[in-house]
Image: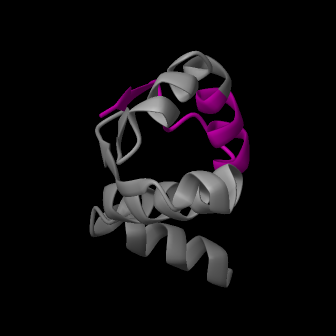
Amino acid sequence: MKLDEALKAFVDENKLRPGLDKVDVAHAWENIMGQGVNQYTESVDLRGEVLHVRLSSSVLREELSYGKTKIVEIMNDALGRAIIKSIVLR
């Protein structure tokens, strides 16, 4: 058995995928959105297939709300699979 197969089996057997997805999504948000958005980001949380992002700037929240579908596409591309179905900005 190859190492990557063994790790994948370990993750699946111990049901670690949701926790790993949360970490991957938080890192992808930081990398994709850049420093300008990250300084106003208070929290990034994946709940099921919905990404909840808390922002400290109402202006930024409004701007990002216009591009929610594009953000979902970019995030899923960066993650390598369709983890996120929608985004809630608060």
Q: Position of 9 compared to 68: left or right?
A: left
Q: Is residue 11 above or below residue 73?
A: below
One can see residue 63 in this view: yes
Instruction: Name which residue lies at 48% across and 31% down.
Output: 59
Within the image, what quadrant is residue 71 found in? top right
Q: Is residue 44 above or below residue 7?
A: above
Residue 11 appears at what percent x and percent y?
40, 69
Whole-percent x, y for residue 2 in the image: 68, 80
Q: Residue at x 60, y 71 (%)?
A: 5
Which span of residues is magenta-colored? Answer: 71-90
Which residue is drawn at the image coordinates 63% and 41% (left, top)?
75
Residue 72, placed above or below residue 5: above
Q: Is residue 13 left or right of residue 75?
A: left
Is residue 31 found left or right of 6 in the rendered image?
right
Q: Is residue 82 magenta?
A: yes
Camera-side residue: 90 or 78? Answer: 90
The image position of residue 26, as x and y in percent, is 47, 60
Q: Does residue 1 appear anywhere in the picture?
A: no
How many numbered tags mark residues here? 0
Q: How does the figure colour the protein chain or chains?
A: one colour
Question: In this picture, is 56 found above or below 14?
Answer: above
Front residue of this view, candidates 40 and 45 = 40
Image quarter of residue 86: top left
Residue at x 46% of width, y 68% of height? 9
Quadrant location of the C terminus in the rendered image: top left
Q: Nearer the viewer, residue 37 or 74?
A: 37
Q: Is residue 33 left or right of residue 62?
A: right
Q: Quadrant of the N terminus?
A: bottom right
Give whichever of 9, 40 is nearer the camera. 40
Q: Quadrant of residue 66?
A: top right
Is residue 21 magenta-colored? no
